[in-house]
Amino acid sequence: MLFKELTIKNMTLKNRTVLAPMCMYMAEEFGYAEYFHMVHYVSRSMGGVGLIIQEATAIDQNGRISPKDLGIWRDNHVEQLKMIVDGVHKNDTKMGIQINHAGRKGIADRPLAPSAIQFNFKYHIPKKMTIKDIKKVIEDFKQAARRANEAGYDYLEIHAAHGYLLCEFLSPNTNKRKDEYGDRKKLIKEVVVAVREEWPEEKPLAIRFSASEYVEEGITPEWIADLINELKPLGLDIANISSGGNVSEQEIKLFPGYQLDFAKTIRSKTGIVTIGGGLITNLEMADKAIIDGSCDLVYFGRLLLREPFYIINHAENLGEDMPYPKYYKRAKA
């Protein structure tokens, strides 16, 4: 199953493998892509990955996780991002981008958050957002979607996981508001509607969720499933399932595939195309996750950092003979 094509809207993937969005912290001061990003993403496309999701890319200069984050808050970011997209496309791999606002985990002296609750002592105390602040963030997501489309990305992912701004609004641990945005689902719905005004209907739209906060009171896979069922009519096509990151004191038992049960629960309750993963160690494990209904696609993180050509080099383990890039054919084992 891992090497079976999958079509979502106008995007056909040659296989079900995904490079997870992982921050590289290698951008220029103002968010511009470097040669590093071209090499990093294009090399993984040469290695046979079906879909690449670019690292969290900031929709606002003050909404970055670090000063070295990639940016998409300016129109002139598009030119360099387009070069990455075009490079990846040459290897028959689809290219996605994750757009993000870091919220209280951002670099600003007064980072924005739904409520003035500090993540931990290493971070600044955030400013509780005004309605004006919220409306600006919605518009920033919308304009980032426009730029992503102009750059030619095939897939757009809204980051609502790992304790960043949209995740903060979703969680009862960080959203203590008494106004209309105390409704934890309201902002993400408005962001999806705004993004869909610029992101073409024929292109797939995804959201990355943290399905658990690993604390007694917090987001659960069942709650996320209910939310997804409300977001699907608004234009959501794909759910990318991760976990954690919103509560500083959390205990996560890590093991290969530790997040797949979250993905399976959400997929079974929503029927949405689901991306799952979490310390996946080989293609056989990924293939089994798809066969048993945990997810439709599997993301790989650290494995593809270590071995950019892992997919193409080990495809034969599942009986797949993937062609090597013509310029590397002599190296095929």
Image: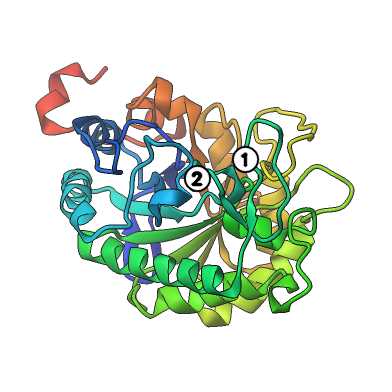
Q: Is residue 241 visible?
A: no
Question: As shown in the figure, which amino acid type bears the numbered disc 2?
Answer: Ala
Q: Residue at x 19, y 32 (%)?
A: 35
In terms of depth relative to the viewer, which is nearer, 75 or 280?
Answer: 75
Circles 2 and 1, Cβ within 8 Å, touching? The answer is: yes
Q: Residue at x 33, y 57 (%)?
A: 73
Q: Residue at x 38, y 22 (%)?
A: 307
List the residue tagged with mark 2: 108
List the residue tagged with mark 1: 124
Q: Residue furthest left?
A: 327
Question: As shown in the figure, which amino acid type bears the numbered disc 1?
Answer: His
Residue 189 as seen in the image, left or right of residue 48? right
Q: Is residue 51 visible?
A: yes
Q: Pinpoint residue 224: horizontal percent, then vertical percent.
A: 71, 63
Image quadrant where one finds the C terminus: top left
Residue 137 higher or lower than 1, as above or below: below
Residue 121 as seen in the image, left or right of residue 134? right
Residue 24 as seen in the image, left or right of residue 118? left
Q: Pinpoint residue 136: horizontal percent, then vertical percent.
A: 46, 70
| Residue 331 quadrant | top left
Residue 261 as seen in the image, left or right of residue 110? right
Q: SS for tag 1?
A: loop
